[in-house]
């Protein structure tokens, strides 16, 4: 699929068909992540592929807004070694988005579940919940979970209304570019 078609047509999908993703496609998603740029090329990421139904159900309870993982056949937890990079958030965010774009280009759909800075309940962070549940070492921070699968809902592509030229300045803030 042409690159701009991928960008326009990718939408967050939170309901998935009860159909597994072939192993080769899951590997492709991870290859897309590994092709991400990272600060000083430190590549601090660690990706946890979860395809066990009970574990996916548990992840769907990590926080409000994770419930789409109940139907996702695969979730990729995006984490990074904080001791390796002070900009692990940026590095991991780019990798997560590579996964989302690659998923769409491969005929899959996905959505992002924010974990960092979110709460599981009043006492526990979503990150602690995921860390404990998947046995993630202390030096690894958890950014997000990308739920992936074959879509069970349709969403229209983004239209030209997203091109918000008021948000672009030319040479100085506030001077319109277009
Ligand atoms: C940093 C970030 C955090 C997000 N967190 C969640 C989330 O926790 N749960 C969820 O269902 N969607 C989440 N999303 C998806 C957004 O809601 C979605 O991208 C946005 O509404 C635009 O829709 P689109 O992806 O279809 O273009 C998140 C997206 C980003 C980039």
Image: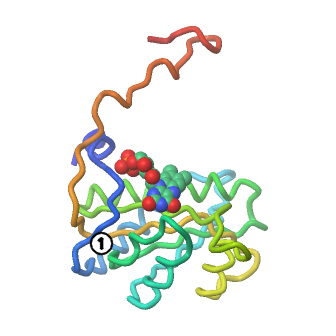
Residue picked out by circle 1: 25
- Dividing the picture into quarters, in which one does residue 73 lie? bottom left
Instruction: Indicate if the residue with disc 1 has its beta carbon within 8 Å of ligand 1.
Output: no
Would you say 25 lies left or right of 116 here?
left
Q: Position of residue 40 (x, y in %)?
A: 69, 52
Quadrant where the C terminus sits is top left
Work out whether 165 lies above or below 32. Answer: above
Q: Position of residue 167 (x, y in %)?
A: 52, 22
- Which residue is rendered at x = 39% and y = 69% of the image? 68
Work out whether 75 lies above or below 13. Answer: below
- Asked if residue 96 shows in the view, the reply is no
- Dividing the picture into quarters, in which one does residue 133 lie? bottom right
- Dividing the picture into quarters, in which one does residue 101 lie? bottom left
**Type of colouring:** rainbow
Q: Label 1: few (<14), some or many (≥20) within 10 Å?
A: some
Would you say 82 lies left or right of 45 here?
right
Work out whether 40 lies above or below 61. Answer: above
Q: Position of residue 113 (x, y in %)?
A: 50, 64
Work out whether 93 lies above or below 169. Answer: below
Q: Position of residue 143 (x, y in %)?
A: 61, 64
- Which residue is rendered at x = 60% and y = 79% of the image? 130
């Amino acid at each position: 699929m042409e690159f701009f078609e991928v960008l326009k047509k990718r939408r967050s999908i939170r309901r998935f068909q009860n159909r597994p993703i072939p192993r080769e496609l899951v590997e492709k998603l991870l290859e897309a992540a590994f092709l991400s740029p990272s600060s000083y090329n430190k590549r601090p990421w660690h990706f946890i592929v979860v395809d066990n139904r009970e574990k996916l159900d548990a992840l769907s309870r990590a926080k409000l807004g994770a419930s789409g993982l109940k139907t996702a056949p695969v979730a990729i937890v995006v984490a990074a070694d904080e001791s390796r990079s002070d900009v692990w958030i940026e590095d991991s965010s780019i990798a997560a988005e590579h996964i989302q774009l690659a998923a769409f280009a491969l005929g899959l759909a996905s959505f992002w579940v924010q974990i960092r800075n979110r709460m599981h309940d009043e006492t526990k962070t979503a990150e602690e919940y995921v860390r404990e549940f998947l046995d993630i070492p202390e030096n690894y921070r958890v950014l997000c979970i990308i739920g992936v699968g074959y879509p069970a809902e349709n969403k229209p592509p983004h239209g030209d209304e997203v091109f918000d030229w008021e948000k672009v300045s030319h040479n100085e803030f506030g001077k319109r570019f277009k």
